[in-house]
Image: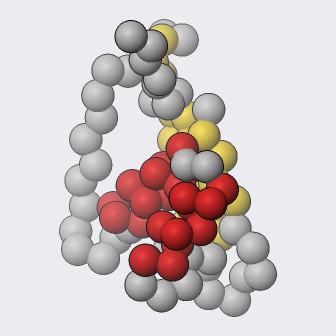
């Protein structure tokens, strides 16, 4: 069985995130698990949706964006970027 590890994710102009970069590595090895904590309405669900979108094929990503309430691109911006490593 092949495993996929996300070692870094970057969001630019995605909902509440102007510019976010998070490393999921420790000593150049992927960490085995991570916990996302935060108060309500601080972007936890947006972060997880962005990771899901980054892992999807383009057609599936379009369907996920349609299901998300509101705009996915940050208010006042024309485009956003999700980058997974």
**What residue is at 62 percent from the left and 60 percent from the top?**
59
Q: Is residue 55 toward the left or the right of residue 77 in the image?
A: left
Res. 26 in view: no
The quarter of the picture where the C terminus appears is top right
Tell me which corner region of the image, top left, top right, bottom left or bottom right, holds residue 55.
top right
**What residue is at 43 percent from the left and 17 percent from the top?**
3
The quarter of the picture where the N terminus appears is top left
Res. 56 in view: yes
Q: Is residue 49 toward the left or the right of residue 55 in the image?
A: left
- How many numbered dots are placed on residues in this image? 0
Q: What is the image's colouring?
A: secondary structure
- Between residues 44 and 26, which one lies in front from this camera angle? 44
User: x, y percentage for residue 16?
Assistant: 50, 74
- Seen from this angle, which residue lies furthest right? 78
User: x, y percentage for residue 45?
Assistant: 34, 64
**What residue is at 69 percent from the left and 68 percent from the top?**
80
User: x, y percentage for residue 81?
Assistant: 69, 59
**Looking at the image, residue 46 lies above or below residue 55:** below
- Between residues 81 and 21, which one lies in front from this camera angle? 81
């Amino acid at each position: 069985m092949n495993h996929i590890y996300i070692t870094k994710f970057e969001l630019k102009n995605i909902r509440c995130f102007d510019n976010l970069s998070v490393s999921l590595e420790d000593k150049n090895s992927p960490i085995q698990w991570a916990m996302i904590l935060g108060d309500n309405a601080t972007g936890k669900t947006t972060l997880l949706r962005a990771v899901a979108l980054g892992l999807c094929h383009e057609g599936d990503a379009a369907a996920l964006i349609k299901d998300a309430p509101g705009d996915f691109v940050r208010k006042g911006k024309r485009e956003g970027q999700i980058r997974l490593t």
